Amino acid sequence: METVNEYDSPMYNEAVGQFDRVAKLMGLDDNVSDRLRVPQKALVVSFPFRHDTYTDVETIFGYRVQHLTTMGPTKGGIRYAPDVDLGEVSALAMFMTWKCAIVGVPFGGAKGGVRINPMELSRAELQRVTRRFTMEIINAIGPETDIPAPDLGTNEQVMAWLMDTYSQHVGHAVPAVVTGKPPALGGSVARREATGRGLMFLLPQAARAIDLNPEGATVAVHGFGNVGRYAALAGQQMGAKVVAVSDISGAIYNPDGLDTESVGKWVDENRYLEGYHYADFLDGNDVFALDVDVLVPAAIQNVIRKDNAPDVKAKLIIEGANNPTTLEADDMLRERGVLIVPDILANAGGVTVSYFEWVQDVQKYFWTENEVVARLREIMTRAFDDVHGIAEQEHVDMRTAALIKGIRRVADAKLVRGIFP
Ligand code: NAD
């Protein structure tokens, strides 16, 4: 099968490579597999962005890609990052499709991105970019069509501006157009913590599978944003010892364990980890080689590669970020017996609570934190058991098993819907 040039990029080729490998293993119908290799809709926009100085106007590129519209509305985050491109967003949209199918939420995958460095923007600039990008994609999104959420470089405030822009456009408040917004606007309680917490709910099951005691297990987390921070916090609350966390400024390391709540407060006040007391300061990439039981990559893609995979000492990797491990590194680590809980399973807690948020907004009836957390735990632990069961039955690794589960569900739905016209 050929690569589709429109989307050609290392990350898209990697996503399709993973898909092809599993589709072949499953004996998937060629017609269905050809259809699933490419996004159904992709919107590329460019727009002018005025800096605070009012003299500079920059042309900015943005994307919204809907991989699969078969299952219900499409769902996926919007990332702001300096290297975002169509291929990357398309790969991430495809991952979202499998992720939604693995946890059984009735959405297809989507993703959006704006090629900009959010760290360099003032609050006013961030707001202007968000509102203009929302207007550019406004006909593609909606509570019954495509529902954005936060991702790398975006947060609750960005989602609030997106919701406001959409609502101004249609003339009334539409909270269900976006998830991951503040609870004051119809956001769900416990959404902010959902991805990191959901990931850590899998630690006991994953540890059991490799005879590791999760109580006191040492953990290093790469990334201390929405996913990494709450994964570290949940890990510590569950009795693991979080010895290192990192962000773009570097990593902090304390072999006796970090107080993750105090680290969070430091970042709230100082933005970056650098300067935090009670820990050594290392290069951010040093976390991959630390002598720990569990590694949680939770920042960006392609950070565990063939060059640093041999240095990894952890026995268990739980992927918080999307696509943090290259295919080559994945093979190398598996050969060494490292258990990898793949991104499409491990970080699905985010889209699960986003689904809860959408349900609450549509029904205009809100749940308690205990209800949200209990349902999240139930869905995540069941998904892990399902995927682990497939891995044992088919004698495959967890990533392959997760893809089999996701692809099977989507392919079944496509076949029963048939082809229009
Ligand atoms: P975020 O912007 O809140 O945090 C990102 C963290 O990574 C920050 O600590 C930042 O300093 C660090 N970082 C950014 N660029 C880096 C670089 N070049 N090198 C090293 N560190 C860097 O983002 P997030 O929402 O936590 O998302 C992190 C990852 O998790 C992404 O891959 C995202 O797609 C994935 N993810 C997020 C969610 C969610 O609910 N937010 C859900 C599923 C998957």
Image (cartoon, rainbow, N blue to C red):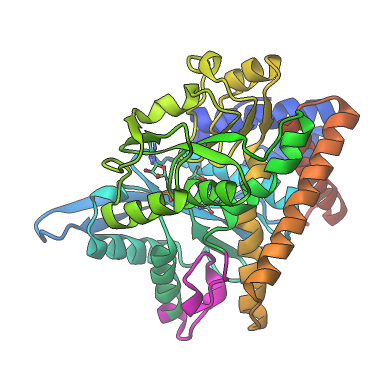
Relative to 194, residue 292 above or below = above
Relative to 391, residue 357 above or below = below
Asked if residue 91 can be seen in this view, the reply is no
Where residue 101 sits in the image (x, y, percent)? 74, 50
Q: Which residue is drawn at 80% across and 32% down?
A: 30
Where residue 128 sits in the image (x, y, percent)? 28, 64
Where residue 234 sits in the image (x, y, percent)? 57, 51
Image position of 172 (left or right of 388) = left
Q: Which residue is drawn at 52% across and 79% down?
A: 174
Q: Residue at x 23, y 49 (%)?
A: 120
Relative to 297, residue 63 above or below = below
Image quadrant for the N terminus? Answer: top right
Image quadrant for the C terminus? Answer: bottom right
Foreground: 173 or 153?
153
Where residue 198 sits in the image (x, y, percent)? 64, 52
Quadrant of the displayed image that contains ligand 1: top left
Asked if residue 280 can be seen in this view, the reply is yes
Q: Which residue is drawn at 67% across and 70% down?
A: 370
Please give the range of residues in magenta.
168-190
Secondary structure mostly seen in the magenta stretch: loop
Residue 167 falls in image quadrant: bottom left
Foreground: 338 or 342?
338
Relative to 361, residue 269 above or below = above
Residue 171 falls in image quadrant: bottom left
